[in-house]
Amino acid sequence: MPAIIGPVQIINVGGGIVQFGDSLYISPKSNSKSTSGQGALNTGGFIITNNGLNASNVLDTNLIDQPTVGNN
């Protein structure tokens, strides 16, 4: 089914897909990995973290963690 699109202004794109018109199948894929120490990713209004010795294991022995290609 055809789509009638008026003026479009895209200010910022932080990833993803913009589709105008017909489409049968859209499957965007992404993956990421992050490491942080204990208590570093806490969210909330009032947080108290009491941590002792902190060490993050950033050694990654896996060649592929989450395959993205061909993962429909």
Image (tube, helix red, strand yellow):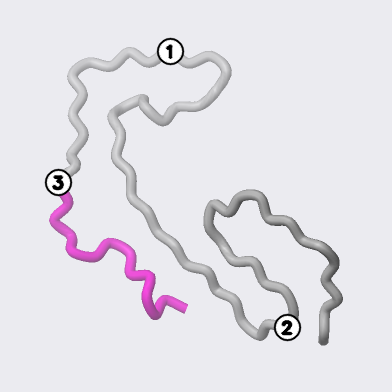
Magenta segment includes 70: yes
Which one is earlier in the sequence, the residue at label 1 or at label 3? 1
Please identify, in this view, whether the residue under mark 1 or under mark 3 is nearer the observer.
3
Q: Which residues are magenta?
A: 60-72
CA gap between label 2 and label 3 equals 45 Å
User: Residue at horizontal 18%, vertical 64%?
Assistant: 63
55 w.r.t. 10: above or below: above
What residue does disc 2 label? Answer: 22
How far across and down, in percent of the image, does residue 66 sit?
33, 64
Q: What crowding class fits label 3: few (fewer than 14 Cα within 10 Å), some (14-19), or many (20 or more)?
A: few
User: Which disc is residue 20 wearing?
Assistant: none
Give the numbered dot on residue 48.
1
CB of mark 1 within 8 Å of CB of mark 2? no
Q: Name the amino acid type tagged 1.
A: Ile
Real-space Cα separation, disc 1 to disc 3, in angstroms? 29 Å
Residue 21 lies, in percent from the top left, at: 74, 79
Q: Secondary structure at mark 2?
A: loop
